[in-house]
Amino acid sequence: MFSITLLCMGKCKEKFYISAAEEYAKRMKAYCDFHLMELPEYRLPEDPSAAEIAMGLSREAEAIRKAIPKGSWFCVLTPEGKQQSSEELAQTLSNVKTSGKSAACFLIGSSFGMDPSLKAQADLKLSMSKMTFPHHLARVMVLEQLYRAESIQAGSKYHK
């Protein structure tokens, strides 16, 4: 069975986001072996300098690389990435599956973004919108779109 991992920097605290994320994670299990992993954000001072942010992102990148399942197709969510429709995301995942990969990994970075080396490592840089969203809402949105992509591939009536 194909495996999808969603790596998220930071812990979700709001119950309504947690509840929504859990619901989509549960639904995903009908289509794939799904894992959601929360990794801790590097602690920065209240008003960090650019050098402190860069160091923090570099440290986060080390933890992220260890968490990416070996041999996974890797996608980062980043504002400068490519925008795709739900159908295009479904086709992207279908192409990954037929390419011989048995796993995909998606990354939502921390509040300061992600280390540029992770973006360079990615098979796809994906943008959800030109708008800015809270990270916890973005998590729910990505989960919903992954579920929608899987349901499109399965031909279910969820996507209308």
Image: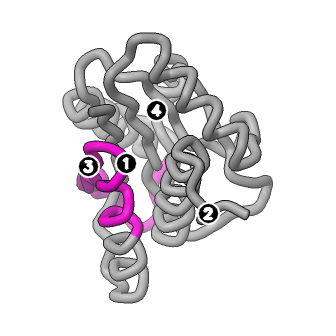
Identify residue type, mark 1.
Answer: Tyr
Q: Where residue 92 sits in the image (x, y, percent)?
A: 61, 29
Q: Where residue 50 sits in the image (x, y, percent)?
A: 52, 43
Q: Quadrant of residue 83?
A: top right
Q: Which of marks 4 and 3 is in front?
A: 3
- Which stretch did the figure color magenta? 24-49
The structure residue drawn at horizontal position 35% and vertical position 82%, both measured from the top left corner, is 19
Identify residue type, mark 4.
Answer: Asp
Estimate how packed mark 1 is, as few (under 14), some (14 to 19) or many (20 or more) residues with alpha carbons within 10 Å: some
Q: Name the residue under label 1.
A: 31
Q: Which residue in the rendered view is the most extreme toward the bottom?
A: 15
Identify residue type, mark 3.
Answer: His
| Secondary structure type for disc 3 | strand
Q: For residue 157, which numbered disc appears in the image? A: 2
Q: Which quadrant: the C terminus?
A: bottom right
Asked if the residues shown at circle 2 and circle 4 are in contact, with their CB atoms under 8 angstroms apart, the answer is no
